[in-house]
Image (cartoon, helix red, strand yellow):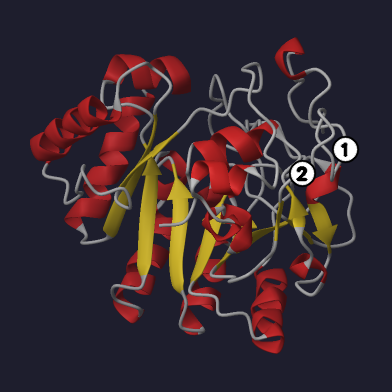
Amino acid sequence: MKDLPQSTANVGKFQHSFVTASGEKRAVVALSQPESLWFNTGTLCNIECANCYILSSPSNDALVYIRADEVRTYLDQIEVRNWPIKEIGFTGGEPFMNPQMVDMAGAALQRGYRVLILTNAMQPMMRKSVQTGLLQLKSDFPDQMEIRVSLDHFSQEVHDAERGAGSFKKTLQGMQWLQSNGFTMAVAGRSQWGTNDADSRLGYAALFEKHGFDIDANSAGQTVLFPEMDETVEVPEITTACWGILGKSPKDVMCSSSRMVVKRKGAAGPTVVACTLLPYTPEFELGPSLEDAEQDVALNHPHCAKFCVLGGASCSA
């Protein structure tokens, strides 16, 4: 499985790990404060979005289901490496397609971590067995788990254009179940449709009020608006000089505080990648252990520039 092809806009760029096309020293980020460890539960999804950065679909099993015993192995490694992890995140694909999702979340909750699950809140989450498991976790570990629902836009028309006819209604039904059962809920939207941030938040606020959702549209942690990861748009390469020019620090970038565990189809076991956005790019694969994952990361991809450094986005709360 490969990344989506880059357009000619970035030809010549992002070719060398430590040097930019202009010969300048590329910015490199150290894992300075590991706070989040993500697990990709598998790329299979119940729907296929028009612009999915990880190419999830009902047929893409490039990343296969990770198992609860494998998750526990990495939780053990956190303790051995003495990483100051605060949050364990689960993403996909659709995490609730994985039959061991509830067990995996429980394993992290039992260790005292905050758990964040990303979901489209559609049929996989609404199965009775999953609902029963989630309710038990909520009872056993109150206020320790957050469900972040992918709601690309506050209007049905735009959301369904991305995720398929009827998906908006089904997602709202899932959100209503979460709300009525007292789950801590957040929303992840996109900023690709030309609406400015303030107007988008007004739209989400109206939607949340209409349906009685206890979500703050003006909170960047509760309503996360992600910049679009479009590799056809030209972006600058990030050099070491950029930190001073932009008034930012390497510690502001997601790979300074997080890693993601994936399991590739046909692989003997899971491996760790530097970024939740780049599971297919070989350069960002660090090795099978958390010790391997402690190496520095060169910002050698358009997503590094647009999403993390210039967009200032983060997958964590």
Which amino acid, mark 2? Arg
Seen from the viewer's position, the closer of residues 86 and 124 is: 86
Seen from the viewer's position, the closer of residues 195 and 176 is: 195
Tag 2 near tag 1, CB within 8 Å: yes
**Quarter of the image holding residue 198?**
top left
Give how far across and how far down residue 57 sits, in percent. Answer: 63, 30
Which amino acid, mark 1? His
User: Is residue 54 something one can see in this rendering?
Assistant: no
Earlier-in-chain disc, 2 versus 1: 1
Q: Is residue 154 left or right of residue 225?
A: left
Q: Is residue 21 left or right of residue 279?
A: right
| Residue on which the image places disc 2 | 26
Compared to residue 4, the image places residue 113 above or below, namely: below
| Residue on which the image places disc 1 | 16
Assess disc 1: are there few (<14), some (14-19) or many (≥20) residues with their C-alpha within 10 Å of its C-alpha: some
Give how far across and how far down residue 293 sits, in percent. Answer: 77, 66
Q: Is residue 178 left or right of residue 99?
A: left
Compared to residue 60, the image places residue 74 above or below, namely: below
